[in-house]
Image (cartoon, rainbow, N blue to C red):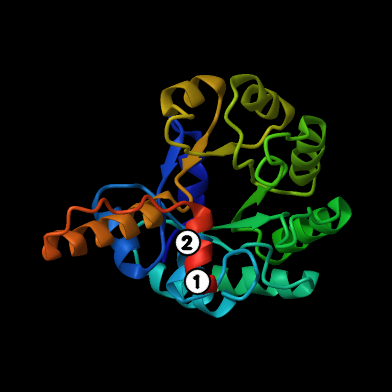
Amino acid sequence: MNHPQTFRDLHHGDGPLLLPNAWDFASGAALAEAGFPAVGTTSLGVAAAAGKSDATGDARDETVALARSLARLPVPVTVDIEGGFSAGVSDVAGLATELASYGIAGVNLEDGRSDGTLAPLDHQTALIAAVKRAAPQVFLNARTDTFWLAEGKPDMDETLRRVRAFAEAGADGVFVPGITADDDVRAVVDAVDVPLNVLFTPGRTDVARLADLGVRRVSTGSLLFRKALQAAVASALDVTGATAEAPAFSYGDVQALVAR
């Protein structure tokens, strides 16, 4: 069973916590064996592996089952629970309590919804507060999708309003996937007294630079899962002797695969 305080401490080391995201037990075990001090899950990978779409709330059972198995790992585990798999505050708090009982050290809880909107701020802060009351030992990484859903035009004022409100509601950390510009990252770091998590984006983010800006956690999201799909297809094509190049799967490509 993982000690939550160990995971919390990893956010206050000499550099950012580099958090790889697994989609099944084998990938999680391999990442732990490779020396990563903690492992997260990717909601896209967990859902897609079950033939389901991400961010729709349909992969609750798969997420809980994976969490229970990953708790066997010798490193802390944090679980992406999308929006909580329910609109009911008590249901989400109950889920956090269940995960804590397995030894899960953290959860990601997002405010983005499958219809492309953001959850009302008062609802999200009530959700965060309820989760922290129910499972205070769990590191709650509160994610806002202000950048993720903005289609190139993020609202920085709304981003800052949300991360501040999340921190005030009791979140242990905040997560803004899609944020990459130095000034934007620095603004979020300066706005809250809790660790900022940034999503690693190949070609757009640099871990050393993020460390200089004050970022405390860098996660890979669905990147490893998508790379694994590409590698599997490439290996299969090699067996056939085909010269075709394996596709580089985007988030949307994976969502399209499971929607067929």
Q: Residue furthest front?
A: 243
Relative image position of residue 96 (x, y in whole percent):
63, 68
Query: Amino acid under label 1?
Result: Val
Asked if 82 appears above or below 251 in the picture, the reply is: below
Q: In front: 80, or 71?
A: 80
Find disc 1 in the rendering and name its residue: 258
Find disc 2 in the rendering and name its residue: 254
Query: Amino acid under label 2?
Result: Val
Q: Residue at x 61, y 76 (%)?
A: 58
Q: Residue at x 76, y 37 (%)?
A: 159
Asked if 151 appears above or below 223 in the picture, the reply is: above
Q: In front: 151, or 139?
A: 151
Secondary structure of the residue carrying tag 1 is helix
Return the mark for residue 226.
none
Q: Is residue 106 left or right of residue 127?
A: left
The answer to which quarter of the image holds residue 24 is bottom left
